[in-house]
Image: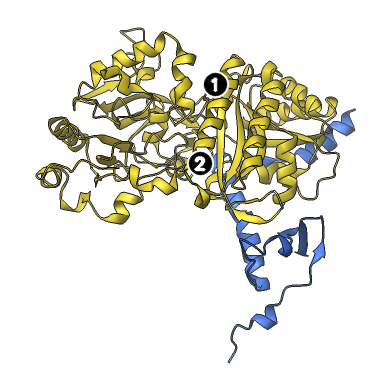
């Protein structure tokens, strides 16, 4: 694909804004910022390589870069940790990647009003390490906890493993400053007031500028919740003889009313089959174990112990078998850090091949989980029948609502992909499969994504179907705020706003 | 001179656990080498290297627990209390 050359003066102008040491045009700097961990067409890597990378150190620098991009009509793509699973940080039209990793400072800790204000390049694990001596935690806890960054969490409106207790990114971010697609710097919150949690003044713009996958601006500062560090953690994994019993137990646990409950997870038979094959915690499990339910709780030590007893009773009364402390504590701890897990999959003949972990997510109502599970696995089986490069690693469902662990579930089917084997035919089949997975989610009354976003090839085709008339509003907002379509163009079918 | 010798760190012989899995050290599972013969090859590991990886894993999990809470409550202990109460 031909790439329009950058204007001759642009690199020099970027250097004038950010400094010589903060502008990169070398091959490794560009190619390493072309992809994220979501399935990526490695056979067409060149299609997504940016033409320049800048690592700014201030909001003012980012503002000037964005204004420059508008003058030259060059795309700008924001990038934080680059750990997203829906391509938000992948350049669709090349251009300039604005990487915020150098903006990683804590600007203020306000113990009195319980806020911490940070730059977007800080990571949650590092932030919580700084907060620990003060007795606090920032409990935004994705599976990429050690490597994703606050700016990306806002850009994707991330989901947290312990969100049912502490809330998700949207609940933990009080307000933030961002550079709009035309370069102005504004702050958005519930209303005004950098540290105000609840306001009825004006439009609720905080939510508009969360989860836009970099299409509406670049976050430059955020004021976050400062949460008391839990005294105690409890996690328990229960084994079940069939999926239906586990599914019912999941609801019993989620609806228990235990205030310290932070999440409930359901693993299906396909997941167990995969884990029993390739995960040391599950290999020794007996054949009767067909599904697993996990719970986790956090809080004051006496509250956690009391709640944990209630949860253990519920699990036991639902015919669940406690799998022991080693699995319960070890497996739970590993869920904070899934990106560090080296992975392999199997060909249909059982041979080990190097595979990347990919999970396709949706928001699914508890009542629809059995039906969606069957339909999703059928789609995965269709892929595996045609191509050796896919492996079905099973499904899990995770309590999805903030502060109230019931109702809908973040539901994911994990599919191993042997990415070195991509070609146009297998990529097209994958895109078709993604579209069908999304269709099942919508047909069941769910949403295409609970966590990752929905702007990749395939699934994005159904965003207008899910949003209905609201998608036209989305296009009008995009065109109004980004008149030149420079801010991460090509995402979410938003080019249609300019036709 | 004392140097590293692979022969002195030879892992124990494998025991079959399932159709797909073997074991050399207690609770340390390995993919059956026969299933790693076409696309990915198993490497020879000295015993200390396997032990280091396993120990590091436990250290990592403890470190991760410590990021979220001061203590971890034992389900086994609570279950014993529940049984005593019943």
How far apart in space, not on screen, are marks 2 and 1 (Cα)? 40 Å
Looking at the rendered structure, the secondary structure element under dot 1 is: loop
User: Is residue A305 found left or right of A115 in the rendered image?
Assistant: right
Disc 2 crowd rating (10 Å Cα; few below 14, some 14-19, many 20+) is: few
Q: Is residue A372 left or right of residue A3?
A: right
Mark linked to residue A230: none
Of badges 2 and 1, the one in the foreground is: 2
A2 in relation to B47, above or below: above
The reply to whether residue A204 is in sight is no
Instruction: Please determine whether, in this image, residue A281 is positioned above or below residue A445.
Output: below
State the hue of chain B. blue
* Residue at figure coordinates x 61%, y 50% from the top left: B62
Disc 2 and disc 1 in contact, CB within 8 angstroms: no
> Callout 1: 10 Å neighbours few (<14), some, many (20+)?
many
User: Which residue is at the front of the view, A307 or A76?
Assistant: A76
Chain A visual colour: yellow
Subunit ID for the residue under disc 1: A
Q: Which residue is mark 1?
A: A402
The residue at which mark 2 appears reads as A425
Q: Are marks 2 and 1 on the same chain?
A: yes
**In-front residue for pair A295/A44:** A44
Residue A163, placed above or below residue A150: above
The image shows residue A16 at horizontal and vertical percentages of: 11, 45
């Amino acid at each position: 694909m031909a790439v329009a050359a950058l204007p001759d003066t642009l690199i020099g102008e970027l250097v004038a804004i950010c400094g010589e040491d903060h502008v990169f045009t070398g091959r490794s700097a560009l190619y390493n910022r072309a992809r994220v961990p979501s399935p990526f067409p490695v056979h067409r890597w060149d299609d997504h390589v940016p033409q320049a990378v800048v690592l700014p150190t201030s909001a003012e620098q980012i503002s000037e870069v964005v204004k420059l991009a508008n003058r030259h009509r060059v795309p700008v793509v924001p990038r934080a940790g680059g750990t997203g699973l829906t391509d938000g940080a992948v350049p669709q039209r090349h251009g300039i990647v604005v990487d915020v990793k150098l903006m990683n400072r804590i600007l203020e800790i306000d113990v009195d009003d319980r806020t911490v204000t940070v730059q977007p390049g800080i990571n949650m694990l590092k932030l919580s390490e700084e907060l620990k001596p003060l007795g606090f935690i920032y409990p935004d806890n994705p599976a990429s906890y050690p490597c994703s960054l606050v700016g990306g969490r806002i850009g994707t409106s991330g989901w947290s493993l312990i969100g049912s207790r502490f809330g998700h990114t949207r609940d933990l971010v009080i307000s933030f400053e961002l550079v709009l697609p035309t370069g102005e710097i504004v702050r958005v919150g519930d209303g005004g007031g950098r540290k105000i949690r609840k306001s009825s003044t004006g439009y609720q713009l905080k939510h508009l500028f969360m989860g836009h996958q970099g299409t509406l601006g670049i976050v430059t500062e955020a004021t976050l919740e400062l949460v008391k560090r839990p005294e105690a953690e409890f996690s328990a994994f229960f084994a079940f003889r069939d999926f239906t019993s586990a599914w019912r137990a999941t609801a019993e646990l989620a609806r228990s009313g235990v205030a310290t409950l932070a999440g409930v997870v359901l693993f299906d038979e396909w997941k167990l089959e995969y884990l029993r094959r390739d995960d040391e915690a599950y290999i020794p499990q007996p054949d009767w174990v067909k599904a697993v339910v996990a719970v986790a709780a956090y809080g004051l030590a006496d509250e956690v112990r009391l709640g944990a007893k209630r949860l253990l009773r519920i699990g036991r009364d639902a015919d669940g078998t406690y799998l022991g402390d080693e699995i319960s504590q070890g497996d739970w701890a590993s869920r904070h850090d899934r990106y560090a897990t080296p992975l392999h999959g199997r060909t249909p003949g059982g041979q080990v091949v190097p595979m990347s972990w990919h999970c396709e997510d949706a928001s699914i109502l508890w009542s629809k989980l059995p039906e969606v599970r069957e339909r999703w696995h059928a789609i995965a089986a269709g892929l595996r029948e045609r191509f050796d490069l896919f492996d079905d690693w099973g499904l899990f469902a995770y309590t999805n609502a903030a502060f109230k662990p019931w109702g809908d579930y973040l539901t994911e089917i994990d599919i191993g992909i042997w990415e070195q084997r991509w070609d146009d035919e297998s990529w097209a089949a994958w895109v078709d499969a993604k579209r069908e997975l999304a269709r099942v989610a919508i047909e069941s009354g769910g949403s295409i994504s609970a966590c990752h976003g929905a702007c990749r090839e395939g699934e994005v085709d159904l965003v207008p179907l899910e949003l209905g008339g609201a998608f036209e509003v989305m296009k009008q907002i995009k065109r109004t705020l980004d008149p030149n379509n420079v801010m991460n163009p090509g995402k979410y079918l938003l080019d249609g706003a300019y036709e | 001179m004392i140097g590293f010798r692979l022969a002195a760190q030879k892992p124990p012989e494998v025991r079959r656990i399932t159709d797909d899995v073997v074991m050399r050290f207690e609770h340390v599972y390995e993919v059956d080498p026969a299933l790693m013969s076409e696309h990915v090859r198993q490497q020879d590991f000295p015993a200390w290297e396997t032990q280091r990886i396993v120990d590091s894993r436990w250290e990592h999990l403890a470190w991760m627990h410590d990021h979220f809470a001061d203590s971890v409550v034992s389900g086994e202990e609570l279950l014993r209390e529940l049984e005593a109460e019943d």
